[in-house]
Amino acid sequence: MGKVLTHKNVILVLIAISLTYLIYTLLVGSDLNWLHFLLLINLIGLSFTLKNVKHTHHNIIEDPIAFVSFDGPLMWIGNTAININEIRKLTLDTAGNDGFFSLPYNQISSGKTPSFTFPACQFEAFRAHLREGLPKAQFITEGLILKSHS
């Protein structure tokens, strides 16, 4: 099995490339091409930027049935309440050992929709839980829209 390329490894590689370039220019006696050097430095900065991009909308939830509950006209996703009448479509799918849940048409704040990842072994039970609480919602799975049981 191949080694996983981590962010730390990428940074180390970029630093090594920068140092190699600097040492090469010093040993050969050529002029330092500042454009090339700045390009390498920017690549390092880009890697730091990418490290700070977090996918907080894909929290890992171990027990999705406990995390998503229904109380009268509200669906609770953790501490966030959404009116059930506003939920028309939801995505629910699996890939490998992960299950994915999202309400792509229900923003909870500007540009942020409720979504999370959960263990795929809980997929069927969680789907039944959602169908019971959201009988009119359409389930979008693998590009298909499945009508909930009415």
Image (cartoon, rainbow, N blue to C red):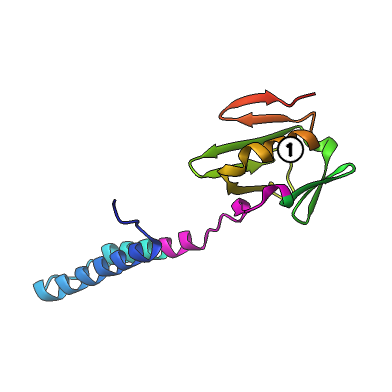
Residue 111 can be seen, yes or no: no
Q: Position of residue 75 (x, y in %)?
A: 81, 45
* Viewer-side residue, 89 vs 48: 89
In the image, residue 148 above or below residue 80? above
Question: What residue do we see at 46% from left, 59% from top?
Answer: 50
* Viewer-side residue, 16 vs 25: 16
On whether residue 26 falls in the magenta region, the answer is no
In the image, residue 59 above or below residue 16? above
Question: What residue do we see at 73% from left, 27% from top?
Answer: 148
Quadrant location of residue 55?
A: bottom right
- 119 lies left or right of 69: left
> Which SS type dominates the magenta stretch?
helix
Residue 88 can be seen, yes or no: yes
On whether residue 52 falls in the magenta region, the answer is yes
Q: Secondary structure at mark 1?
A: helix
Question: What residue do we see at 29% from left, 63% from top?
Answer: 35
| Amino acid type assigned to the residue bearing label 1 in the image | Leu
Q: Position of residue 125 (x, y in %)?
A: 67, 39
* Viewer-side residue, 16 vs 78: 78
Q: Residue furthest right?
A: 72
- 10 lies left or right of 24: right
Where does the C terminus fall, quadrant-wise?
top right
Q: Position of residue 62 (x, y in %)?
A: 62, 54
Question: What residue do we see at 62% from left, 43% from top?
Answer: 122
Q: Position of residue 77 (x, y in %)?
A: 75, 50
In the image, residue 61 above or below residue 7? above
- 28 lies left or right of 81: left
Quadrant location of residue 102?
A: top right
* Magenta-drawn segment: 46-65
- The residue wearing badge 1 is 130
